[in-house]
Amino acid sequence: MSDLLIFLQGFVLALILILVSVNYTRRPKNLAPGPFPLPILGNLVQLGWINATKPHVAFAKLGEKYGDVMSIQLGSVYAVVLNSYEVMEEYLPKPEFSHRFFNGWISERTLSKRLGVVFAESPSPWQELRRFSLRSLREFGFGKKNGMHAIIHAEIEEIISDLKSKIGENNGIITFDEYFSISTLNLVWSMLAGTRYEHSNPKLLKLTNVVKEFFLSTNTGNNVLLAFPEWRNWFPNWTGMTAQRNCHHKTNSFFQEIIDERRELGIYKTNPENLIDQFLFEIDAEAKKGGSENAPIFSEDQLVGLMNDMFMAGSETSSNTLAWSLLYLIRNPEMQEKLQKEIEVVVPHGTFPTAEHETQLHYARAILAETHRISSVLPLMAPRAVVEDTYCRKFLVPKGTYVMANIYNIHHDKIYWKDPENFRPERFIDNEGHFKSDPRVKPFGFGKRNCLGEPLASTSLLHYLVVLMQNFTFRGVPNEPLPTDVPVDGITIAPQVYRALLECRA
């Protein structure tokens, strides 16, 4: 080896050590503990070494060493990970932790602007957009049990009819591959547009696949576009940004088409029929008030962002949760039989559940609570941020810090749950056989910025499960392994494609 090569190697090593030293010594001394960050990459290497595809698992593992409040350097992004229920419950409801992390990569989804309700700035315009959305949903039926039930039951009827027809086509064997996505998307669409699509509609089928591709293409824990948002323009193909932009373009174009149709129809001016119409009415009303120094809260771009939020958040999570619940019932046939017996006693055969039935379906609610817990469909809560220096316990959280709540870890805490790897709905049944909720099951998040669609999701999941169990028994396919509970990871956690043998119940 030449002297020059030895010198160059030594020079590079010295430079790396200097960068490490400078980077470390410049950090405030009272930050939360965490693994030592490398130059440029930060902790991406350590996270990838522990679990490259499951950042929530890597955070949980590191939390065993560094604690419930932990520093993580994701390339150019400094983050704090919250790993326990206690710290999330204490800090996430606080106003200083109620903001959203937002960078160039995240902005790509909504026309490179901070649009919609999920990533809106707090307190305004987030509060106003959320109030508007809740008020409109109540006005058009989703705040009333009967109205919401009617829409849910229309979707379930089509699902039951479709499954019965498929049973005759393949000896009762059905493949579940995003099977419930169209139906749950339709529920969201009914919220927005007051109408629904047939499940065979090619436009909705295409859109479902686009949404699925996006959710599986990335995560909010350790992906390179989150860590280095500027790379989306430097290396769009290598980072996957080109494919994601294609997804965003298709979904946003779809929403804009609907907005244009409703505006051209003109009904919104005198008799709004749905949330989109009501939003268009507010756009015109705000425009009449004259200009403002600030960007208008009500605009067509803002409506596209709001529709995007509801569409993305409301479809994938519910469909995955339902698919997981059926998968676990196939793997645990004695639980399925117990659930069917409860339904036979509570809900008259051939009818849909009512609001009164919901409180009596104790085991069904326990099944869903345990599904939420074990599957943790959204393992990392939607990104939070702090907009000023603050503290979490005794640790400084500097302005701009990305705050991640590891929901997966509180759902799989071995100290609290004892056997978190086991599907055991009895955790949620008391000594009298009644359902008992547990505050540590948090599929919809913490604080005021929890999921807007929680009432619809909770009600629809219960009704879907009950009616499916009324009409069918789901079994493993003979001579095939039972469906695996090893997930497919992305922004959400989905079950792998699985097959089941369905039998109609008299």
Image (cartoon, helix red, strand yellow):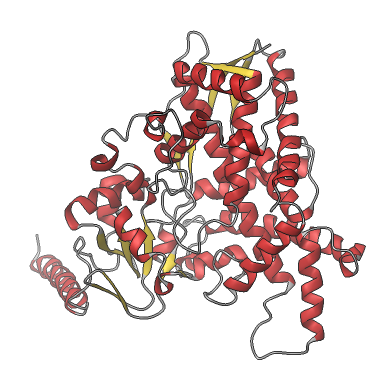
Which residue is situated farthest in the front direction here? 432
Q: Nearer the viewer, residue 503 or 11?
A: 503
Q: Nearer the viewer, residue 340 or 241?
A: 340
The reply, left or right, for residue 280 in relation to residue 336 is right
Q: Position of residue 478 (x, y in %)?
A: 51, 9
Give the answer, above or below, for where 142 lies relative to 286: above
Work out whether residue 147 can be spotted: yes
Locate residue 270: give its quadrant.
bottom right
The reply, left or right, for residue 246 in relation to residue 429 is right
Say which residue appears at 47% left-offset and 48% top-offset. 443
Say which residue appears at 41% left-offset and 66% top-offset. 228
Q: Nearer the viewer, residue 220 or 428?
A: 428
Q: Position of residue 60 (x, y in %)?
A: 28, 49
Say which residue appears at 85% left-offset and 61% top-offset. 262
Locate residue 246: give its quadrant.
bottom right
Give the answer, above or below, for where 410 lies relative to 501: below
The reply, left or right, for residue 15 in relation to residue 402 is left
Q: Position of residue 163 (x, y in %)?
A: 69, 22
Work out whether residue 113 can be spotted: no
Quarter of the picture holding the N terminus = bottom left
Quarter of the picture holding the C terminus = top right
Give the answer, above or below, for where 199 lies relative to 164: below
Say which residue appears at 65% left-offset and 83% top-offset. 295
Q: Position of residue 411 (x, y in %)?
A: 36, 44
Give the answer, above or below, for where 331 lies relative to 420: above
Task: Tell how many labels.
Answer: 0
The reply, left or right, for residue 30 in relation to residue 146 is left
